[in-house]
Amino acid sequence: MQYNVAQLLQAQTGTIRRHEIDKPAEEVQALLDGDGVSARGPVHGTVRLIRTIDGVLVTGTLETAIGLTCDRCLDPVEAKVTLDLQESFRPTIDIDSGAALPPVKGEELATLIDEQHILDLSEVVRQLILLETPMHPVCRSDCRGLCPRCGQNLNEGQCDCETETVDPRWAKLQSLLDDTTEVESVS
Ligand SMILES: [Zn+2]
Ligand SMILES: [Zn+2]
């Protein structure tokens, strides 16, 4: 996901370059190492690099799949994620003079075009994947979870533990907990 944008930077404002992205899952995994998220599919889609007055605007929609754990029953869950890319990149070197451009306060390193005019989408894509990762993935909306006493997976059958009546004060909280993100199941 690295592009040499030297030519694009020399082009007129409004010039567009399209690039297909098809980054294999293993390489996506390398990006996500240490984030507690596993890649389950390639990152693919099309991006448009648009020459703007002060840099390059990258737009596009990418799709990928990540592996998570069901919040209730701990079974593996695969979630498809869509990444909406819209990020301005700025050069660190003036393309015509070769002079270093002054840094802009508060600017992220991830959106800088380096001295070799390489625009690298990796960090932006990594951040988007983490942003789109569901906080409370469930394997299915009616997942019954694990018995809090014996740990039995209640999707596979009822255990022998006594069922407790739910305190009405907790019922409201429970309904909030039930409002978790639904993701596509592996099976
Ligand atoms: Zn589940
Ligand atoms: Zn039980």
Image (spheres, grey):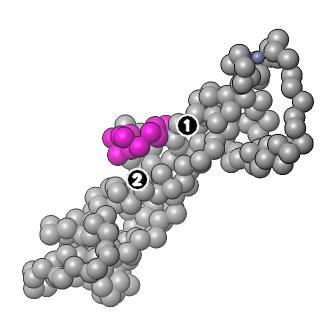
The residue under label 2 is which amino acid type? Arg
The residue under label 1 is which amino acid type? Leu
Density class for disc 1 (Cα within 10 Å; few <14, some 14-19, many ≥20) is many
- Residue at coordinates 48% horizontally, 51% vertically from top-left? 130
Q: In the image, residue 68 lies at what x, y percent?
A: 55, 37
Q: CA distance from mark 2 to mark 1?
A: 16 Å
Q: Are marks 2 and 1 in contact (CB under 8 Å)?
A: no
Disc assigned to residue 68: 1
Q: In the image, residue 45 lies at what x, y percent?
A: 47, 56
User: Which residue was labeled with disc 2?
Assistant: 126
Query: Is residue 162 at least partly visible in the picture?
Result: yes
* Image quarter (top left, top right, bottom left or bottom right) of the N terminus: bottom left
- Residue at coordinates 24% horizontally, 70% vertically from top-left? 113
Question: Magenta residues?
Answer: 27-40
Q: Is residue 53 above or below residue 133?
A: below
Q: Is 108 displayed left or right of 70 in the figure?
A: left
